[in-house]
Image: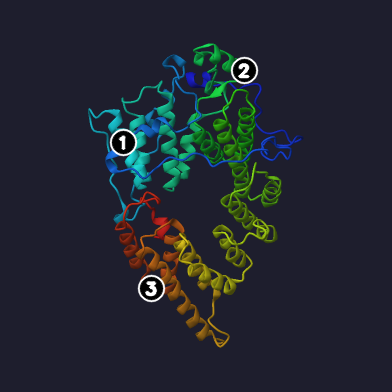
Amino acid sequence: MDPLTAAHHRNASRSSRPRSSTRGPLDALDDPLSASTLPTSPTKDKSMAPNTFTGASFHELDPLAPDDLPETLGKDLSFLLRHNVFHTLSHLDIPPPLRSEFLILNPGEPLSSSLAILEKLLSEGRFLVAAHFSASILTSSLISSTDIRLIFSLFYTRLACLELSGNTVFASQESKTLEDLSSAFYYIDVGPARADNDNDLEHEHAHEHEPRHIVPWPLRVLAVRLQSIGFGDSRRGIGGLYEIGIEVRREIMRKGISETERDVWKQRLADLGISSINALIEMGDFDAARRSLGNLRVPGPEAELTKLRKALLLLRVGDLDAASQVFGDANETKEAALLKPLISMSDGRYSDAVAEWRALGDDRTRTDGALVAQNLAVCLLYTGQLDEVFTTGVLVWLAQLILSLQARQLLEAQFSANHSFGSLVFNLSTIYELCSDNAGYLKGQLAETIAKQPVTGQTNLDRPNSDLKL
């Protein structure tokens, strides 16, 4: 028997799914957290110069992970370092102008140099190459099977990059290697080991019997979704989110926790609520998603971005009235201004949406001009006619052609301004198919245009053929 299988034992105190007869941890109305303000989670500065990449970020994936983990912890992660865990990747599905050669480890190169290269690939948005390189590091002799923090960080990088590069199926299969993340194998008691004086002893005594999870939080949340895909069980994802939600609430109420740490756990609980609703939408259970969204309570005053997320979810489930009431009378914010034309589009009033998007496009203070222009172009396509004078079939076709050309000019202008996010690429490729018999050539030219754009690190440079409808 594989020693890994023998090491994984289910904790008796953890259920595999939330009990249907009780209120869930993500939608409790009597939330003890409502008295304080929800902060934004800490972020790291990504605007670093090329010569400042050191690879140190791979040791800091989770700021709340148990620190100073001893080498004698007894957790051997060699099962994540096998070559057969990782799929072979190919760039044949990427347009030639956008292809980047896979990197290989240089013999004798130190681990810090390899991590710095990987960090640079991520900052540039070369996710497919980064996925390949992270697997190369994991399967090399540079990694010790007991270096828990680094192994989990690289494994998370591998899975996240696979998903970002359009290889979610590979990521879901590889995530199954982690097996049951709620098993006792992934928990340790860090209390006694961290007590160095009397104050520490008193502080740790309060929670020395509460085990701490050794897997970084981002990897745990990502693995819930990927494993539900890999096992073909969408309900597994909902149950997994509720299960870690119970643990989050326990961490928030843990005695001796600092306010900074408690604030981060509050943010994580709020994100889990949104993630559970997203999972219900992916399952196609829109009624449950609407009910969960109505019961969702965010501690403290809601940020404008949080309100916009709620409004978009309501639009996705088809509740236009509730979406229009999310911001109330506060329609002067930039987030609220986006909602009005989106509601018009959802209601099929594309002529109204065109006027509303044009009004937003005239606001030079906005920083989302590319997004506004893209939605305006889509509405122009759906409008279908220029004026009531177009009554015959030929004139209607001519009106549609003119509108398509207007949409094309709008979107091509965004690429000239060095914008190239996924939906923008897909929509312009669609317009090429509508406007020209030589769409394949135009899409190839579009790929070359994208390849010449400056690297910002905000988009995936290893864009697959499907993005350009090739």
Single out the residue that lies furthest toward the right: 21
Instruction: Tell us which disc is closer to us: 2 or 1.
Output: 2
Q: Earlier in the sequence, mark 1 or mark 3?
A: 1
Residue 116 is marked as 1
Residue 444 x %, y %: 33, 63
From the viewer's perspective, is residue 146 above or below residue 115? above
* Amino acid tagged 3: Asp
Instruction: Tell us which disc is closer to us: 3 or 2.
Output: 2
Q: Give the residue pinned by disc 3.
A: 437
Residue 379 x %, y %: 53, 70
Residue 2 visible in the picture? no
Which quarter of the rendering shows the C terminus? bottom left
Q: Is residue 396 left or right of residue 132?
A: right
Q: Give the residue pinned by disc 2.
A: 206
Quick one: label 1, few (<14), some, or many (20+) residues within 10 Å?
Answer: many
Residue at 59%, 54% in the rendered image:
308
Quick one: label 2, few (<14), some, or many (20+) residues within 10 Å?
Answer: some
* Amino acid tagged 1: Ala
Residue 179 x %, y %: 52, 29
* Amino acid tagged 2: Ala
Quick one: label 3, few (<14), some, or many (20+) residues within 10 Å?
Answer: few
Instruction: Specify the quadrant of the image occupied by residue 345.
Output: bottom right
Number of numbered callouts drawn: 3
